[in-house]
Amino acid sequence: MDTIRVGIIGIGNMGSAHASCVASGKIAGMELVAVCDPIPARQEYCQKTFPQAKVYSDYPALLQDATVNAVIIAVPHPLHSEIASAALKAGKHVLLEKPVDIAVSKAKQLNKIAEESGKVFGIMFNQRTNDLFQQAREIIRGGQLGELKRSVWIITNWYRTQHYYDSGSWRATWAGEGGGVLLNQAPHNLDLWQWICGMPCEVTGFCDVAKYHNIEVEDDVTIFVRYPNGATGTFITSTGEAPGTNRLEITGTLGKIILENGLLKWWKLKSPEPQVRVESQKNFEIIPSDYEEIKPRFEEPAHAGILQNFTNAILHGEQLLAPGIEGINELTISNAAYLSSWNGNRPVKLPLDCEAFDKKLAELAANSSLKDTKVSDKYNTAYSKRWQINW
């Protein structure tokens, strides 16, 4: 095989951008051969814009197309694992938009199917392509910051207007989207948080519903976590603050790093803090440190980077930067934050009680109301900068 013949399922904001990217030849070794959307207006758009691609109205028909050997799935969140599972069973490689689904229980089922399929399964965590986050991961996972003490991420520059939430009938509803800022915008940051610092063992969530917008779900969140070694972490996100902040600070026994304004700032203690704490004969001590500022070594390739990596993984065995099975990690944190918030902000220990979460989510979805919204006639011919890392 020298070319990946891809079908794109879902031609909304993300799907239309992916289709334009592939059709324009920006992904070496990938060819757009099919698209799928149940909405007639979007089918008509695809017929005019991508004449080389077959147009389907339902995904089972696309999955039966023998010319398609991989799919990109960009549909509402509750359909993610359902369609991804069907595609893997049909023998297709799968690149899935984030989040992997709305419930950890579904992600577990999908991961099992993916592992049994032998196919390449990736997820669109495009912010993993940013070099500063890659270097932060190398520093932490490589032990250069010592043992983790604390992590704090303030990520409040996901600002959205009421018009944004009203632009789709499924948006910001429990039945249609399965959550708010934790399910739509912050999965990128939750993923990077655990990718760099590791998974916590306990989560406490404060999820404020409709604090700034007329919606069913949360638009302002504070999460407190504990790690297995006793370290703590705080994650703050919102779609109702302006100007927002994007600042990640991680402290360890050998110093700290701060990622902000497109820089990685690194303080390297000349003596380990625990050693100074125990051995110093002074009441107060300023531990000498070296300071370094690190800039990105390369421009963030973002969505196109993940698409190219996915293609290379299929054609050449390249290691996935964002394996689909890892999508369960950030989803576990957000599911736990919801469950904690629903239960009076009580701490939730991991692994997650999926049964308790699914029961409450089903109750919320049963009382959810999809909005009466006109289908958008605007399509993305390029990736919006708001989907990439903004400092």
Image (cartoon, grey):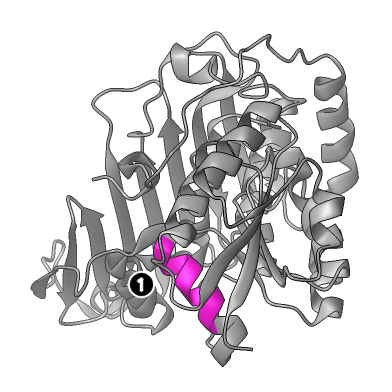
Name the spot of residue 287 as percent of width and height, x first: 13, 71
Front residue of this view, candidates 102 and 55: 55
In percent of width and height, residue 213 lies at 49, 12
Residue ID at (50%, 13%): 211
Q: Is residue 25 magenta?
A: no
Whether 391 is drawn above or below 254: the answer is above
296 left or right, relative to 324: left
Tell me where residue 122 sits by quadrant: bottom right
| 382 horizontally vs 338: left or right | left
Question: Magenta segment: does it hold 311?
Answer: yes
Q: Is residue 222 left or right of residue 95?
A: left
Q: Closer to the camera, 259 or 55? A: 55
Residue denoted by label 1: 134
Of 283 and 327, the residue lying toward us: 327
Q: Quadrant of the C terminus?
A: top left
Can the viewer see residue 245?
Answer: yes
Residue 140, position as x, y percentages in the image: 38, 75
Quadrant of the drawing holding the N terminus:
bottom right
Is residue 107 visible in the rendered structure shown here? Answer: no
Tag 1: Cα neighbours inside 10 Å, few (<14), some, or many (≥20)? some
- What's the residue type where badge 1 is placed? Gln
Numbered circles on residues, count? 1
Q: Secondary structure at mark 1?
A: helix
Residue drawn at (58%, 42%), measured in percent from left and top? 46
Query: Magenta span: helix, strand or loop, mainly?
Result: helix
Read off the magenta span.
304-312
| Residue plotted at (52% across, 82% down) | 312
Q: Residue 43 in the image: state x and y as whole percent.
A: 66, 36
The residue that appears at 30% across and 76% down in the rendered structure is 278
